[in-house]
Image (cartoon, rainbow, N blue to C red):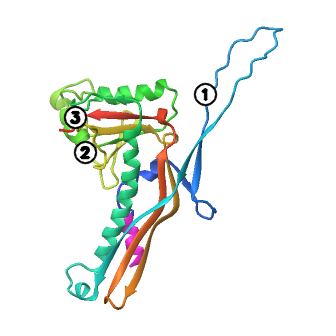
Amino acid sequence: MRDAIVEAAYDVFSMKQHVIGKSLAGIPSNAARFTKYPKLTASALTDGTDLTANTAFTPTQNTLTVGEAGLKLTLTDLADSGGIVGMMEYGRNAGLAVAEKITGDLVALGAGFSTSEGTTNVDLTEQVLLDTTAVLRAANIRGPYARVLHPDSYYKELIGDIGTTFSALGNTGGMVRSESNDLPGSGDSGLVGNLFGHETFISSQVGEDGSSDKENFMYAKNQALGYVERWPIRVEIERDASLRGDEIVVTAAYAVGEVDDAAGVRIISDGA
């Protein structure tokens, strides 16, 4: 029972594997610090002239404090004996809910990046993806990069326009379609693959802005976002004799947060 729940809980897109991760296991604290260094600038010197000016070096820190998330399901003996849905399905769905909560919290951070590319009420195009990469490169943000796109933005807009707006191979129509087999659909992991050299993930948890546009995003995996874990998804089963049933409790203790705003870019696309 317990092993089955844990296995099912990880059978979803897990974004926490693609951000800066810290574990607090064995550490007497419920908070973790993420340090950000300022950029220093050197200048030319004159021979024989004393270097008197001091350059301040003042690192900053973002602190993430963990909290709990989870849910409880109750399965009565009578319901269990009915054979419609057994304890295995109760546990599996509870685990999926917690795992998706973690990913949803991380995906929601993408809407907080200050810099954006794309236009309100306009479909996502290959040029927008390239422009987004250019923003990060111009800011000297180190890779690897990753993108998280809403299914509508990827399938209906970007890939749906192969032969029109999407022509990465310099061809049009059927020629592009036949040569674009490297643009597959995503599996249960959410991974599409590399698009213009960067990992691209699909998540239905990508949100919308006030204009109902999708707030997709691209970010530096080792710089933009942080995830802190006190304990991973865990399962407890408690017998309630007076209720004649079992309580299935699934919880996790974690925190998410933005570490470096300059290391991420929102990608706006039409939400209609």
Look at mark 2 in the image and give the residue it sits on: 151
Q: Is residue 199 visible?
A: no
Quadrant in which the C terminus is drawn: top left
Q: Point out residue 117 in the picture as x, y percentages from the top left corner.
A: 34, 28
What amino acid type is highlighted by mark number 1?
A: Lys
**Does 161 appear above or below 248?**
above
CB under 8 Å between discs 3 and 2: no
Q: Is residue 269 left or right of residue 217?
A: left
Look at mark 3 in the image and give the residue it sits on: 270
Magenta range? 1-9
- Give the residue at x 30% y 53%: 187
Instruction: Identify the disc placed on residue 39.
Output: 1
Near-viewer residue (178 or 1): 1
Q: Is residue 35 left or right of residue 103?
A: right
Q: Is residue 205 visible?
A: yes
Q: Secondary structure at mark 2?
A: helix
Task: Please report whichever mark, 3 or 2, sits nearer to the chain's N-terminal start.
Answer: 2
